[in-house]
Image: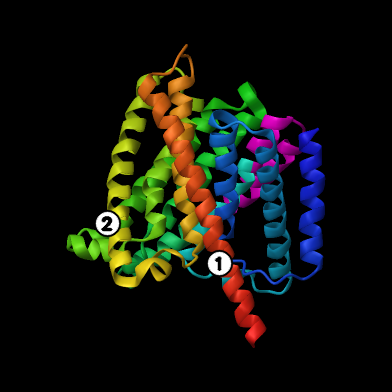
Amino acid sequence: MYLMIALIVGLVGAFLIYKRQVQLKITTLAGAPIMATGIVIVSVFNHVIQNDWIELTLFIFFLVSLLLLVFYLINETKEGLFYERHLENPITSFGIGTWIASISLGNVLISVYEPNAITIVFYSLNIGLLWTGYITWTIRNYSIILQHFNEYIDKFQGGLLLSTVATQSVVISGYFVFGDQFPVPLARKLIWFGLLLYIMNLILITNRYVKLLFTEIIDRWTNSNCIIHGALSITGVAISFAYPEISSLHFVVWGLVLLLFILVEWIELLRAFSRYRKYGWNEGFMVYSPTQWSRIFTFAMFLYFTERIFVIGQDSIHTWVNMFLYGMSFTIVLLFIAQWVILGKSLINEFEEKKAM
């Protein structure tokens, strides 16, 4: 029942917004808030903080946003702008991974509420068309990057790891859509391929920062670098589905994620303090960027990974894990609300500027 309501409202809402010709800035990272919302629903409101109305509202927003993204991308293709805006740049085109992850999360959510044949169609299009085309294009990107390494080295950032996120999301959604019928050999090949992409991209990112002083690292750090631990979290989730019998592997990966989480977020805290001293509160924290959604996604993915490995096959959860789950859940909710406040402020400012013109 909830699924049918959400699908109808989502489709009608997206269509009405699109037909009214609302001007939206569709960047390649437009899938970031969508996939962030999807994993927040899965990790927070499906497990720790259970509220049907909040969950339904977020799911409707998720569907409206995803459908709007599809409508606008189709329109850009018709206008001949798709290549220039989303494919030409070998760095920003990695952001297409957010589209694939968003569709994967859509399949996950629909399968959770009411499994049906439509998810099989979406999954087939996602892996057969989008993911395959995306990976083919990333090979082209690597070719350009390696040929002009010095030109691109200062642009390497966590967004490159979206290739891993997209790949592992296809594995996870496959298990939700097909259950035990999802071919294990395919899942495991995809996982290891995604891990290979992770290592390759991490080497590129490390090359950007390895020769810098620590203060320079803080100044040049980017929001999307939190995907360094987020991409490994989603890899861990995929492993928990494809290798359920090797619990030791789950905990090894979880431990690595925890170490990277502490390291990356410690740098991020230092960066936040530095930005506050330089720019103050408004300029330092209240300026919107699509990359800010990556923190919500990565935190929520780490939460979901923790839920997976500490709950599966166990009768109870250790007290400290329980505290972690609730603490992380409320942190994610606060970040989610704060991000909407920042986005709202940005939209209001943009509206006032247009009105003044």
Residue found 68% across the figure and 63% down from its top: 73
Give the percent coordinates (x, y) of residue 277. Answer: 28, 67
What is the span of residues highlighted in magenta in the rendered image? 106-135
* C-alpha separation, residue under disc 2 versus residue under disc 1: 25 Å
Image quarter of residue 78: bottom right
At label 2, counting other C-alpha atoms closer than 10 Å, the crowd grade (few under 14, some 14-19, many 20 or more) is: some
Q: In this view, does 244 lie above or below 172?
A: above
**Rendered view: 121 above or below 291:** above
Residue 107 is one of the magenta-drawn residues: yes
Q: Is residue 136 visible?
A: no
Q: Residue at x 41, y 71 (%)?
A: 283
Disc 2 target residue: 270
Tell me the chief SS of the magenta region. Answer: helix
Query: Which image quarter holds the N terminus?
Result: top right
Residue type indicated by callout 2: Leu
Residue density around tag 1, few if under 14, some if 14–19, many if 20 or more, within 10 Å: some
Q: Nearer the viewer, residue 90 or 146?
A: 90
Q: Is residue 310 visible?
A: yes
Are circles 2 and 1 on residues that touch, CB within 8 Å? no
Residue at horizontal 55%, vertical 54%? 32
Indicate left or right for 179 with 2 as reference: left
